[in-house]
Amino acid sequence: MESHEITQEELEQIDVNDWIKNHEVVKDRLTPAIIITAVVICSGLLTLSFAGFLI
């Protein structure tokens, strides 16, 4: 007979799935902010390096 008890791995997988579902909303809000921040930092570094090159 096979026992159909939930194993520790299955339990962890369920926890991960719940965590992902709960954090989808947060991720959707954070992603644009992270992209904007990265773009601002990159453009700032490019501007600084370009200005340093000119000087």
Image (tube, helix red, strand yellow):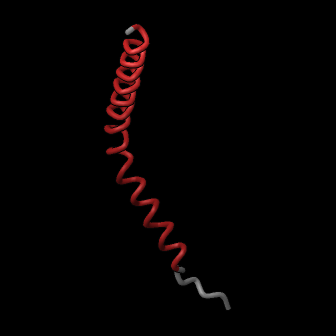
Horizontal and vertical percent position of residue 37:
33, 30
Q: Is residue 3 above or below residue 55?
A: below
> Outermost residue, front direction?
55
Along the line of sight, the residue nearer the viewer: 40 or 51: 51
Residue depicted at 35% across the width and 21% down the height: 44
Q: Given the current orientation, which residue lies at the most extreme right position?
A: 1
Residue sitting at 54 percent across and 80 percent down? Answer: 7
* Image side of residue 2 versus residue 47, left or right: right
Dividing the image into 4 quarters, which one contains the N terminus? bottom right
Q: In what quadrant of the picture does the C terminus appear?
A: top left
Instruction: Count every numbered label the image shows and give the total.
Output: 0
Depth check: 14 or 26 in front?
26
Q: Is residue 42 left or right of residue 26?
A: right
Residue 17 position, x and y percent, is: 46, 59
In front here: 17 or 48? 48
Q: Residue at x 36, y 35 (%)?
A: 34
The image shows residue 3, relative to residue 50, as above or below, that is below
Residue lying at 60% horizontally and 87% vertically, measured from the top left = 3
Residue 52 image-quadrant placement: top left
Residue 16's spot in the image, x, y percent?
45, 62
Figure quadrant of residue 39: top left
